[in-house]
Amino acid sequence: MEFPQTLHDAIKYFSTGDNALNFVVSLRWPTGVVCPRCGSKEVRFLKSRKIWECSECESLRQFSAKVGTVMEDSPIKLDKWMSAFWLIANAKNGISSYELGRSIGVTQKSAWFMLHRIRLAMQDGTIEKFSGRVEADETFIGGKARYMHADKKKQKVLHRGRGHVGKVAVMGLLERNTTEKASRVKLRVMQNVRRHGLHKHIKKEVVGGSEVFMDTLASYTGLEQITSTRL
């Protein structure tokens, strides 16, 4: 399909019929729709509700084109999402939430939410979250404390007595490869490796219902309560 060349064309095109839905499907599933939770191709389209139903999932059988993307958990329609993507991608000098809201007809609060989600997708190069079988791990990166100058060591004490002086906490997520797509890795600098931060990051980046693997770090305890994962 021909991509809209102007904002007027984008708003007109994506607001017509199922163009926005078909556009998302063509980008996300170019070889056919698969379940974002289990990867099965045994799905059927429910035309009246514009969602799909997977015949192999034990629970959460139904899913929309938003599930597993940065658009998930949002009541904003796809035509506004696609117009916002177009507008942000073509704004050479950036765009504020106020301007975005006025352009596509949403509140400033909704526009602010969309801006953050779309910038995240552009940064990662995909609108999809991690799903399926995901590995989570954390580490500390940096030089050894004994090689630091005394003044610098005092400024960078993070966890005195645990060997992490002056080091930066980093969390990594690995999406194991499947027959449909290659493995993906995402790293993020963390303030610490406490439970709240790790849980929040995993919930943000991993689709609920995925199978998450991690080590015995106590900070991962209770993860299944917020992500619906099988540990």
Image (spheres, grey):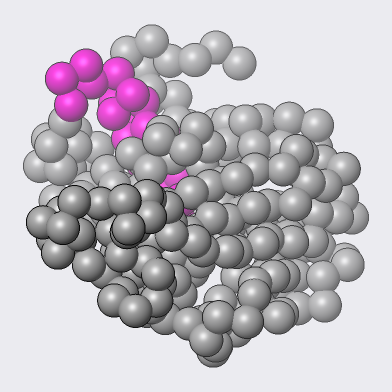
The residue positioned 87% from the left and 66% from the top of the image is 55
Q: Is residue 92 magenta?
A: yes
Quarter where residue 136 is shown: bottom right
Could one spot residue 204 in this view of the protein?
no
Seen from the viewer's position, the closer of residues 20 and 225 is 225
Q: Position of residue 43 (x, y in %)?
A: 83, 55
Is residue 133 or residue 151 the one in the foreground?
151
| Residue 216 in the image, given as x and y percentages of width and height | 62, 82
Q: Is residue 124 magenta?
A: no
Residue at the location (10% across, 42% down)?
98
**Which percent across, then down, holds residue 53?**
77, 62
Give the left or right position of residue 200, taking residue 95 as reference. right
**Residue plotted at (75% across, 52% down):** 176
Q: Quadrant of the N terminus?
A: top right
Q: Is residue 10 above or below residue 193?
A: above
Frontmost residue, 168 versus 175: 168
User: In this picture, is 1 found above or below 155?
Assistant: above
Query: Quadrant of the rendered structure where residue 96 is?
Result: top left
Residue 85 location, quadrant: top left
- What is the span of residues highlighted in magenta in the rendered image? 70-94
From what the image shows, is residue 121 above or below residue 58? Answer: above
Find residue 191 and report its horizontal and vertical position in percent.
29, 64
